[in-house]
Amino acid sequence: MNIKAPRGTADILPKEAEKWQLVENKIKDICARYHFEEIRTPVFEHTELFQRGVGDSTDIVQKEMYTFQDRGGRSLTLRPEGTASVARAFVQNKLYGEVIQPVKLYYFMQMFRYERPQQGRMRQLNQFGVEVLGSDNPAVDAEVIDLAMTVYRELGLKSLKLVINSLGDAESRKNYRDALIGHFTPVKEELCPDCQVRLQQNPMRILDCKTDRDHPSMKTAPSILDYLNETSSQYFEQVKENLDILGIEYEIDPNLVRGLDYYNHTAFEIMSNAEGFGAITTLVGGGRYNGLIEEIGGPTTPGIGFGMGIERLLMALEAENISLEQPSELDCYLISIGDKAEKKAIKILHDLREQGIRADRDYQGRKMKAQFKTADRLGVKFVLVLGEDELDKQVINVKNMATQEQQEIGLDHVAKNIREQLDGGERHA
């Protein structure tokens, strides 16, 4: 019997989960400052949503989706990315009718992609993402990029590079598509089988190919920037101007196209330059996707967003030797000696927790010395000892582990007294 975690998945154990919680809480705080609200969508959707929303020509749809039929014969897919699901929720729940526009959303989602597992790239992956729906103002593009950069900055990352590009509007993309077909057709047979198919389906995606990236034709491929019409060119200039105002440094990469069909106008990636981070340096990718909402049956609604891999974010923190500060796990550890004390400890522990105090006790019947060792390992602030003598006097012995001072507190006032000591310590910290 195979009882190991499936390939491409990983357990997040308690110590590691604390880091995830710290990162997620920091991100939630930043999202609140930028007035983004959380959305949660189902873990699976109708397959057609991703076929239409992500694009039939993408690797995700063609090769990587976990698709199955339910008992009613319906084709369902575990979500491989977040934007299509959020777009579906936006349309289905008529969020386009909200009084306050644009609608600014963020999410933490588990995604599922059947691809070759490697460091920082799993088959079950975790993403933080944002979507802004209902505005085509270039300032929104800059705000979305600024939010992503703020997350990295406030977590302490410094070795970052922002790369941007414009994919233009529909007219610009059509003209560019024709130019790419003309450029790559003479060398079609030299390209990988996937790119030979992409040449007619979506030639722009050839520029994103990992197999053919060193082919000579890549270096001489036409630039999208030469095919932007006046409207697209002006839009890109305004995005850059807004980034300049925010003091955000960036590089322009005409070959940055992103891997999903719904992108247009602004596309961007943030990469790690940290030494030893690995061959795949991208931390976050996103861009504008005007037209996606209409594609899945909604009204004309511009949108922009990004997806940020939490696993890769933690890898980047490790590469830059950034240690996430983790709070003490416990405030109190309760040691009880004797049957009567054991029973009384049940209520004391409950009262401590009711006061918001992080507390635990021994459940293995160990001797006092062993329990004190456990308290030391846990780094608790106070150890509370209750034995037969203390019960007779209706008190509990409280030891401050930092000062080694001990005092007796009446049993009726334990939780309140500890709460006051903790609050006093926090005020004077």
Image (tube, grey):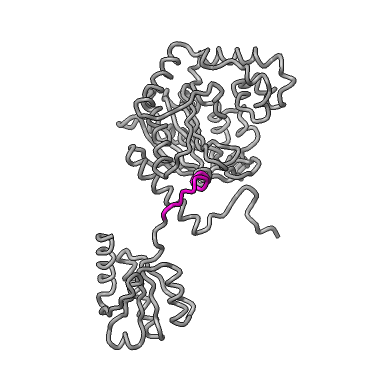
Residue 126 image position (x, y, % from top left) = 52, 45
Q: Residue at x 39, y 23 (%)?
A: 136
Q: Is residue 314 above or below residue 401?
A: above
Of the pair 82 and 180, the residue shown nearer to us: 180
Q: Is residue 304 left or right of residue 45?
A: left
Which stretch is magenta?
Answer: 315-325
Count of number-bearing discs: 0
- Taking the magenta stretch, the answer to whether it contains residue 320 is yes
- Taking the magenta stretch, the answer to whether it contains residue 85 is no
Residue 386 image position (x, y, % from top left) = 35, 81
Residue 317 image position (x, y, % from top left) = 49, 46
Residue 82 image position (x, y, % from top left) = 50, 37
Q: Residue at x 70, y 60 (%)?
A: 1
Q: Is residue 38 above or below residue 21?
A: above
Farthest residue, direction front = 275
Q: Is residue 203 visible?
A: yes
Q: Is residue 355 above or below residue 265?
A: below
Q: Is residue 411 left or right of residue 282?
A: left
Check the picture and name the quadrant holding the C terminus: bottom left
Q: Quadrant of residue 116?
A: top right
Q: Residue at x 46, y 36 (%)?
A: 86
Q: Is residue 368 left or right of residue 279?
A: left
Q: Quadrant of residue 332?
A: bottom left
Q: Quadrant of residue 413?
A: bottom left
Q: Residue at x 48, y 21 (%)?
A: 166
Q: Is residue 386 above or below residue 28?
A: below
Q: Is residue 110 visible?
A: no
